[in-house]
Amino acid sequence: MYVCGMTVYDDCHLGHARVMVVFDLVRRWLRASGYQVTYVRNITDIDDKIIRRAVEQGETIAALTERYIQHMHADADALGVERPDHEPRATQYVPQMLELISRLQERGLAYATGQGDVNYAVRSFAGYGKLSGKSLNDLRAGERVEIDTEKKDPLDFVLWKAAKATEPDEVKWASPWGHGRPGWHIECSAMSCALLGAHFDIHGGGQDLQFPHHENEIAQSEGASGQPLANVWMHNGFVRVDEEKMSKSLGNFFTIREILQAFDAEVVRFFILRAHYRSPLNYSDQHMEDARSGLTRLYTALKMAPDHALASSTAVDWEQPHAQRFRAALNDDFSTPEAVAVLFDLAHAINRGQTHFAPLLRQLAAVLGLLQRAPAQFLQAELATGNGLSAEQIESQITARLAARKQRDFASADRIRAELLALGVVLEDTATGTTWRRETEARLSPQKNP
């Protein structure tokens, strides 16, 4: 599996977090299903944005990229994302890029310009547009490309950029066409084929990369090898903020580091996995609070089980009905919403006294990279954030509990009481109604009275 990684000129944002978490889940489930998985996620460490940022900040490209690579690793570690098996950096694979460009030129799919650039001849590749479903005529009619008199066709894209004589300090490598540096698209073709071969199983990345980046990868790689590049293409959906596209210009742009100052990292992971990977993911404080509440509910259920039960090291019994549903969900295009629903069903059963389900809850959650802390540790961490429920939220939960009791749905009433207790809110039922108080220590000892 090859996944397009980060261009390291700034801290990773929530969109990057989704890519990391989604394909971490894909690898975890494939492994749990018995596959041996080789996972490659690249790093783009040479790019126009990187060069501009280094100049702006008065530092070397190497210093800039190394700092943001370390930040990226710290963010991924916090989110429970396992490191890929290979993490190639573009600057380490320039010889492979030169070889690939030469092969494309030999096959009549690339041409050198008088200025020393090398471009890909899009119309010479018969399959261009097959991934995105775009035809060349549609692309030509709606093109918004710069006028470049050196291109034979406006749709052609650059494989090699010639160094500019006016910029003697520009980062560059020697090549058969003169000094320069690779174009962005050729980098992934060279790295994926070098590490996985010309034909591999899964290619992934964000939906924004489907066109033109992944379309161009196909043209380059398949044009050079004559083989299909990947059996399956996977694209995770966009991230939106309060139903608007995340954008720095709109002021709704959040880095992972900023979000982790307000929310536990496991809550962020849970928030991402609650949505199907292909669906849009809408970030808002309320949605994050919902994720926090949901994860608290799961940990509260685990808290009700004896410690020795949670320490069980037995393998998942995939013939058990809950496990069968969980497996069917993830086998259906990695449907994590359905898989998470199974976790809540197990938590509901535990809250009703069936604590023997606790080991299974933890085992299945492990496949998603969740619920692996001691319940008390998570609940203490949540308390330490200082983001307790407001009085209005507490009263709303009490009202919902009262309605459940009137309907004789005592399991739901138990659950609401336990969730509030896990968040440090103790309910006291009297003849005149229900009162509540905050009690820090109560979070670690949930009660089962309705």
Image (spheres, rainbow, N blue to C red):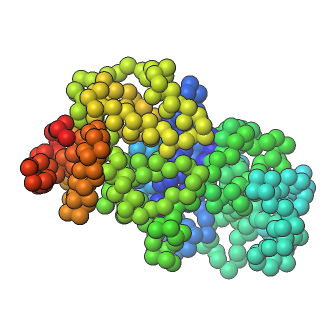
Residue that appears at 59% across and 51% down: 278
> Does any portion of residue 186 appear in the rendered image?
no
Residue 27: quadrant of the picture: top right
Position of residue 154 measured from the top left corner of the image (x, y, whole percent) = 83, 72
Can you say whether 133 is above or below 417 in the image? below
Can you say whether 165 is above or below 8 in the image? below
Residue 303: quadrant of the picture: top left
Can you say whether 51 is above or below 368 in the image? below
Residue that appears at 84% across and 61% down: 135
- The total of numbered circles placed on residues is 0
Residue 263 vs residue 445, the one in the foreground: 445
Quarter of the picture holding the N terminus: top right
Residue that appears at 29% across and 26% down: 354
Residue 279 vs residue 148, the one in the foreground: 279
Query: Taking 84 as reference, is 419 left or right?
Result: left
Quarter of the picture holding the C terminus: top left
Residue that appears at 26% across and 59% down: 396
Position of residue 143 measured from the top left corner of the image (x, y, whole percent) = 79, 73
